[in-house]
Image (cartoon, rainbow, N blue to C red):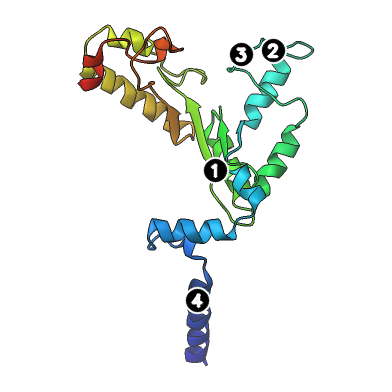
Amino acid sequence: MKVWMMMAMLTFTLLGKAQQPIYKEPGQPVERRVTDLMGRMTLEEKVAQMCQYVGPGHIRETQKRFKGQKIAKGDDANGFYPNLSVNQLLELTEKGLVGSFLHVVTAKESNDLQKLAMKSRLQIPLLIGIDAIHGNALVSGATVYPTPIGQAASFHPELVERISREAALEVRATGAPHGGGYHQGISGERLSRNGSGFGLCQASYCR
């Protein structure tokens, strides 16, 4: 009897593995997994993967801070959606209609959002990131370094690399696998945000 039960369990296990979609199999070639996943996605789901929102916690904090006030035009450090509630955003996440989040500043919130995404039809993980060009500055207690243009003025590439590594560790500790870094371009009068790069000195990039 025990032998038959073991054989039955083994059969069900093998059948379960055989029925698993190709895109969920780590051993399959990336191109084959992508092709399989894309073939299963609706147009709405494909478009949703290109949609990024700020985190629910960030929205709640911003709404509390700016209650009854308008946010200054161009203020990208504070954000919420007048026609989209936090609950509606969470519902979209659970349906697989959110591709990524920005400004998620705790590991708990990051994990909670990923759990919601895993309830969706295709269970596509979220991309979660934060701008951390010179430190994870949106997180209280994080280390904030000089801006990239200031770092370039040190002419100390090893120090800049160390700063980047330290910032990356602090970003990862808050649950975000992706952090916005330096702008890879040579600054000039036609470019905005020159302070986010290493300036006109091409040697900084070559190093």
Measured in 3D between alpha carbons, the distance from the residue under mark 4 to the one under mark 1, in whole angstroms, is: 28 Å
Quarter of the rendering occupied by the C terminus: top left
Asked whether 105 or 48 is in front, the reply is: 48
Q: Amino acid at mark 1?
A: Leu
Residue plotted at (47% across, 78% down): 14
Measured in 3D between alpha carbons, the distance from the residue under mark 3 to the one under mark 1, in whole angstroms, is: 25 Å
Residue carrying label 4 = 13
Measured in 3D between alpha carbons, the distance from the residue under mark 1 to the one under mark 2, in whole angstroms, is: 27 Å
Q: Nearer the viewer, mark 3 or mark 1?
A: 3
Mark 4: which secondary structure? helix
Residue plotted at (53% across, 79% down): 12
Q: Position of residue 84 (x, y in %)?
A: 75, 32
Q: Amino acid at mark 4?
A: Thr
Assess disc 1: are there few (<14), some (14-19) or many (≥20) residues with their C-alpha within 10 Å of its C-alpha: many
Asked whether 110 or 35 is in front, the reply is: 35
Mark 1: which secondary structure? loop
